[in-house]
Amino acid sequence: IADSMRGRVRADEGHLQLGGLRDYLDQLAASKRIIIVGCGTSWHAGLVAEYIFEELARIPVEVEYASEFRYRNPIIAERDIVIAISQSGETADTLAAIELAKSKGATIFGVCNVVGSSIARATHAGAYTHAGPEIGVASTKAFTAQVTVLTLIALEAAHKKGTISDAVFRQLLAEMEQIPLLVDKVLQNAEKVKEIAYIFTYARNFIYLGRGLNFPVALEGALKLKEISYIHAEGYPAAEMKHGPIALIDEDMPVVVIATKDSSYEKVVSNIQEVKARKGRVIAVVTEGDTQIREMVDFVIEIPPIHDMLMPLISVIPLQLLSYYIAVMRGRNVDQPRNLAKSVTV
Ligand code: F1P
């Protein structure tokens, strides 16, 4: 990933575009607006990136469904930067969004996994994720790799712009290097997730809640459950629950809450109380050693502590595992779910 940021991919892989962002970093740091487009999981990675770019680089970001982009008349200025995210690099809606933005003079960056794919070739610059081939249809490791690359881009832009200090830049890079170890730690909890999956195998609905950077993770958790288990699931910002979804909560409604120790922790605790008061069954993803939430909820899945900005890389994994185990227990084909194509090219 670091290599693709530095532009080595272009040299190594025969000019298959996405030659890193080194030549575009000044333009990115000076940009007044970033528009991110993608579909499905890639759109969720874009939502995570919105928080990170705005927090670190203080550049306003809009995240758009690529599938909707061309059905309105989006306002795109010549100096705008459009970041297109796609695992396959072949998603027709994302390609169409790129062409539209290009026709209005925007600079297009890509974050793609498949080397030499149509989207990779249609962009001006960008980075490959190098996540390896996605064996299953539903994106999983692609999400982690997309968020990692987007975080690196945001960090480089913020550093260049001076909105973060050298020390913060180095600290975040150092913490990112710990991610593989932390992912291994989360995977060691797989048995616990499997036990929870067993209890909820035949649930008919699920709600997922998260705040801040864990909100897109809630959306992604719900999408994975829909895609591979065919269970109806909805993700919401935790604070949005009281504006409607709370009416759905009773003892038959499992609620997955991503409740890690960050600045919104106390608010999320009060959301959990609201769910428990209505007899909802709560599965909470918490930071290791959290005793307060453990006492309030039905099940906890612990994950190791990490900088708030990097949390989605870790907090998404138990949700992916939960969907996986539920799907397997229901006898679904997790690699080839019904009705889904790996690349949606029409
Ligand atoms: C987008 C996407 C995936 C989803 C499924 C269908 O693909 O919606 O997120 O899991 O594979 O396509 P892409 O543009 O990221 O390849």
Image (cartoon, helix red, strand yellow):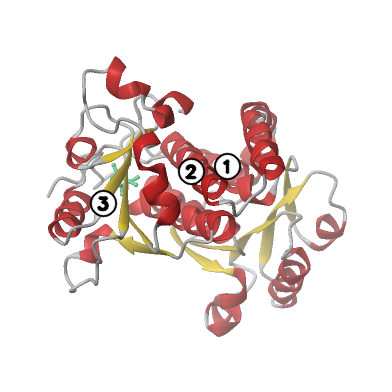
Q: Earlier in the sequence, mark 1 or mark 3?
A: 3
Q: Assess disc 1: are there few (<14), some (14-19) or many (≥20) residues with their C-alpha within 10 Å of its C-alpha.
A: many
Question: Along the line of sight, which residue is nearer the eye, 293 or 331?
Answer: 293
Q: Position of residue 47 (x, y in %)?
A: 46, 58
Identify which amino acid the numbered label 3 is placed on.
Thr
Q: Quadrant of ligand 1?
A: top left
What label sits on residue 107 in the rendered view? 3
Circle 2 crowding by C-alpha within 10 Å: few under 14, some 14–19, many from 20: many
Q: Nearer the viewer, mark 2 or mark 3?
A: 3
Tell whether 331 sits left or right of 305.
left
SS at badge 3: strand
State how far apart marks 2 and 3 are (Cα): 20 Å
Q: Which numbered disc covers residue 313? A: 1
Mark-to-mark CA distance, 1 and 3? 27 Å
Residue 147 circle label = 2
Mark carried by residue 148: none
Lateral position of residue 25 relative to residue 168, left or right: left
Closest to the observer, 270 or 282: 270
Give how far across and how far down residue 72 sits, in percent.
19, 73
Q: Secondary structure at mark 2?
A: helix
Q: Is residue 194 above or below residue 248?
A: above
Q: Nearer the viewer, residue 57 or 255?
A: 57
Quarter of the image for residue 52 reads: bottom right
Mark closest to the chain's N terminus, 2 or 1: 2
Mark 2 and mark 1 residues within 8 Å of each other at the beta carbon: yes
